Amino acid sequence: MEHDRDLINLIDGKRAVIFDLFHTLTSAGAVMPDSPMTSDILGIRRDEWNRQLLEKSIDRLKGKDTDPVEIIRKMAHSVDPSIPMHIIEEAARNRLEKFAASLADMPAASIRTLERLRSKNKKTALLSNADFPEISGWSKCPAAGLFDCVIFSCEAGLVKPERAIYGLCLERLGERPADCVFVGDGGSDELAGAKNAGLSTVMMTGHIKLPPEKMKERMRYADFVISSLDELV
């Protein structure tokens, strides 16, 4: 209970809450749990695919690559150049469908938390590493009107954990780092980046499954760790 009270006190003392999107406010895996993984469709190992997504495809996240099929092709062929185009096209269609569903069917707890924060006169912001295909369904997301500031890396040309993208968010919010808290799952070193930018941090674990050592590494940069966004309010 003391942990809960300390977290609530932290949020109450801030003027703005900045959220990550995927694996924090929503998750394609949670919304469409029976849909095949992209790596399974492509026939490559999941760790190889994740390495391409997280480490080897900065151009898609910065908006330099925009075509959904070409984005998948570049990453897939970096692992296995023999994957045929009809498989790549299938993987691209599946991925578009999953991300659109994750936005259109955002969990009720996320919507509820955003609404409660705004009822407390807190500013809210979205700060997401995402490519254009991943956010193609954003206009149909029920949370789209619940933010004072929305920054997607593909539109900004900046990515977390670069300090400049946090600075851009703070500038658009009109707030100081000390008056804001960042909430995210910790992927892409976003919590470390938020700390470096002067923000308080909360790690959201409800949509992620990681080995204990990787979970521990992300937690190093979290002031608080939660499993549900309801814990924020």
Image (cartoon, helix red, strand yellow):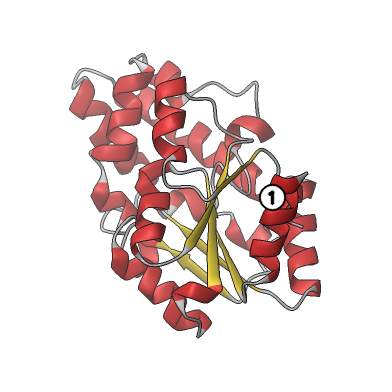
Q: Nearer the viewer, residue 1 or 100?
A: 1
Q: Residues within 10 Å of mark 1 (few under 14, many from 20)?
A: some
Q: Nearer the viewer, residue 141 or 231?
A: 231
Q: Is residue 141 left or right of residue 127?
A: right
Q: Position of residue 107 (x, y in %)?
A: 74, 45
Residue that appears at 78% across and 65% down: 115
Which corner quadrant holds the C terminus?
bottom right
Note whether 159 is above or below 37 in the view shown.
below
Q: Could you tell me which secondary element the residue under label 1 belongs to?
A: helix
Whole-percent x and y of residue 215? Answer: 46, 30
Examine the image and state in which quarter residue 193 appears.
bottom left
- Residue 103 visible in the picture: yes
The answer to whether one can see residue 106 in this image is no
Q: Which residue is mark 1?
A: 104
Residue at position x 36%, y 45% in the image:
188
For this view, does 159 lie left or right of residue 7?
left
Q: Quadrant of residue 71?
A: top left
